[in-house]
Image (cartoon, coloured by chain):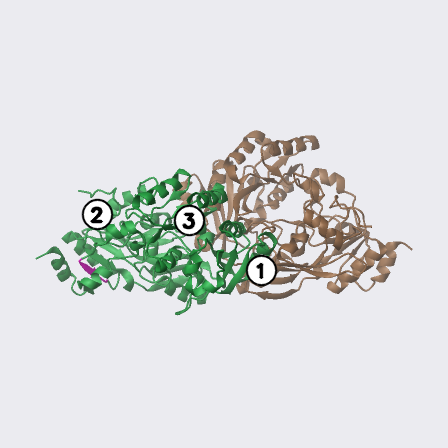
Chain colours: A brown, B green
Amino acid sequence: MEALERLLIDLSDIPHTTEPALVRQKSRDFFWYSPVLNRQLHGCSAQAVISPRNEADVVRVAAACFRHNIPVTARGGGTGNYGQAVPLHGGVVLDMTALDAIEWQRPGMLRVGSGRKLIDIDRETRPNGWELRMHPSTKRTATIGGFIAGGSGGIGSITWGGLREPGNVAAARIVTMEATPRVLDLREGEAQAVNHAYGTTGLITALEMPLAPAWHWIDMIVAFPTFMDAVRFGYAVALADGIVKKLLTPVGWPTPDAFRQVRAHCPDGHAILIAMIAEPSVAAFKSVLVRRHSSGTITFERPTAEAQGEVPLYEFTWNHTTLQMLKRDRSVTYLQALHPAGRLLDSVAEIETLFGDELIPHLEFLRVGGQVTASGLPIVRFTTEERLNAIIGDHRARGVSIADPHVFTLEDGVGHKQVDADQLSFKRHADPHGLLNPGKMRSFRAVE
Amino acid sequence: MEALERLLIDLSDIPHTTEPALVRQKSRDFFWYSPVLNRQLHGCSAQAVISPRNEADVVRVAAACFRHNIPVTARGGGTGNYGQAVPLHGGVVLDMTALDAIEWQRPGMLRVGSGRKLIDIDRETRPNGWELRMHPSTKRTATIGGFIAGGSGGIGSITWGGLREPGNVAAARIVTMEATPRVLDLREGEAQAVNHAYGTTGLITALEMPLAPAWHWIDMIVAFPTFMDAVRFGYAVALADGIVKKLLTPVGWPTPDAFRQVRAHCPDGHAILIAMIAEPSVAAFKSVLVRRHSSGTITFERPTAEAQGEVPLYEFTWNHTTLQMLKRDRSVTYLQALHPAGRLLDSVAEIETLFGDELIPHLEFLRVGGQVTASGLPIVRFTTEERLNAIIGDHRARGVSIADPHVFTLEDGVGHKQVDADQLSFKRHADPHGLLNPGKMRSFRAVE
């Protein structure tokens, strides 16, 4: 009998499937944004999907998989773009979405199962006056556990910084991958062991998340003659600490031409700034526009609406910007750049000039280490992998760091090609045989 | 009959006094922190104090004073340190404290009479979940109008920046000083015309102030072996956008020896960091301390308490730090420095080394133009005016700007010796004869 068959017998009371179409579907994420990853990860699949009902099930799965030496790849909403949730060496996909209970809410803090969708968290916290500090553009489908394991920041990071900033993850409860799995509560700094580690350092079952006061958000589009006009205004607002904001996204033409639901608010040939501004700060936002950046025109102003059938503007930002373009033209791809805070405007202008039409610019303002800067997520008119790598090199040569979205390991995503030393060392204890999402932390060697 | 007598007859139904002791008391502020100002402003006094009951009274006073050519100096709590509320040319002090009504509160916004005390504003907004974004250390006695007219920021500015940042003053209602006074609503950017103008550009009767979500604040003292240890930890917290804070104040020894009510929590020979941290962020604050700045020891941790008889830690910070020292030693004075954000730690260390025991260091972390930096309010062991000016020059030569607290004009307070051009131009329309707090905006020439 195969190891997998024995495993499923051991765990027969836990919901699972080996139905190939389903397993294949749950083995994929949005890696196909990258033509490179699309080629590399195309055929990767687990052999089974197991859906634990609670933490006790997760402990049993971990113990059984350790015993049978079967890889486990945890999965939330499967909204990653780097193949974070794609099993490279088969085994089991662990669908965490049933662990979705809100354990408790306190003022400014929430404890929640890792499988709960982000939008379903906000739905419960907003009536109490709180909201998640940040979320990706996939708020409707992503889970909180998937966000911590595979994300880094998003809508809200212009105020709160990314998930890595001290204070943005209060605790993570994890199950280790050992003969007798341990359940650990990692608090504050310790929780960084599982932050953006693609599930290689433990199976996250619950999270304690610090919350932000919930504002009444207003979605705004401001149209500008040039991309740099939109950037300069966005930067002024980003630096204005008296203006409460959640999102500042300059997007160059012609990308807005692909924004179907708001196309009427995006004038031909114009760059736009998409913003989410707290209602009491809207007047200040307009005052800065009129007094200092008068080439801009507000074309859209409406409370953020995210019920079924509604389209919040954040679904045209972060990686949704790329997605909107991909809907129209499957040949494009994108990059993830981080401009140096100290010379932000010069750096952005330099990159825009350098690549002309080959890159359509798109920035996200955010805070990193307490400084305002911008992440670039340009649309790339893809030709060859060689040319894509040359473009990445051209960015890095100019001091713009690239989190390469065309690689699937933790190490290759960062410029210095090294995994976080604390995460690597933590993994030796939490997953000594290297069975958690194997291949993603390529520096790891199994402990004998 | 004297002009003043005629004026008081015209306004006889409005509360007023010419009783010398009272008038003299209401003609003073805390300028005596500076030995220089103490000498210069010692004998300055109005001839009368008028206490308008409402805006209509203010309009009548303005019209009558214009007619009789009598100077008007508006006054709130009289907590300024630069003689902001001291009449240089006699006339009338306008005591605004009766204009203290809260006109309305909305989520994130408040409209209030300029004479209301800051502590009495928070008392009304906190039950609704809101608080003022920032306040000076004189929260118990200062008024909101006085803060806008004479202040610049304070406790809260580490998160929200100063009053000058776009979005931090929503509107100011003012009465002009003309034959027929106008009542103007200055909104957003326009309101900068009266911000930190010492009441020279209009009589502020009401303000619309954007609010912050009210957190449950925890007062903390952390003791460190050296001042720079306290600075480095404070800076790390200042840059940690995930840690919600309202105050980060490193104070060098021996100043804490003068902090009577918390002296037991200030170990001999140690520098301290005073902090106000939101309750849900306290664990993250401690995590950064233990993991990265382990020379620090928490000696005090208690919810901020500001009822009568209680002593919130903010009463040992900003200019209260100086006050606590002055209570013990009337010979000291202070400076107000702003260190360059780009080389903050180096700049602070350089100044500390340069002056040795002559300056006892004290910083306030804050945001300016979207960047974290620190204001220095060192205690100066005063010898002569010449030496004080040399110390100021030594700061400026090293790129540390000084808002000189030993001068009483708007122009002399800033390094470039120029008044805000928009304020000067606004004053030509709002106070053409230069009757509002005359002598404070010395660049102004009366319009013929």
Magenta region, main secondary structure:
strand
Q: Chain of mark 3?
A: B
Q: CA distance from mark 3 to mark 1?
A: 36 Å
Q: Is residue B329 magenta?
A: no
Q: Inspect this view and state whether residue A143 appears.
A: no
Q: Amino acid at mark 2?
A: Gly
The nearer-to-camera label among 1 and 2 is 1
Image position, residue A132 (x, y; %)? 57, 57
**Magenta span covers which residues?**
B47-51
Observer-side mark, 3 or 2, equals 3
The reply to whether discs 3 and 1 touch (Cβ–Cβ < 8 Å) is no
Query: Is residue B285 visible in the rendered structure shown here?
Result: yes
Mark 2, other Cα within 10 Å: few <14 / some 14–19 / many ≥20:
many
Q: Nearer the viewer, residue A404 or A36?
A: A404
Query: Residue A199's spot in the image, x, y percent?
Result: 72, 52
Q: CA distance from mark 1 to mark 2?
A: 54 Å
Question: Residue A68 lies in what quarter of the image?
Answer: bottom right
Q: Residue at label 1?
A: B283
**Mark 1 vs 2: CB contact within 8 A:** no
In the image, farthest residue toward the right: A1
Q: Residue at 76%, 42% (x, y): give it.
A: A42
Numbered tag placed on residue B434 in the rendering: 2
Query: Split into 4 quadrants, where in the image is the N terminus of chain A?
Result: bottom right
Of the numbered discs 3 and 1, the one sitting upstream in the chain is 1
The residue beneath circle 3 is B357
User: Tag 1, which chain?
Assistant: B
| Amino acid of disc 1 | Ala
In the rendered structure, the answer to whether residue B350 lies left or right of residue A112 reads left
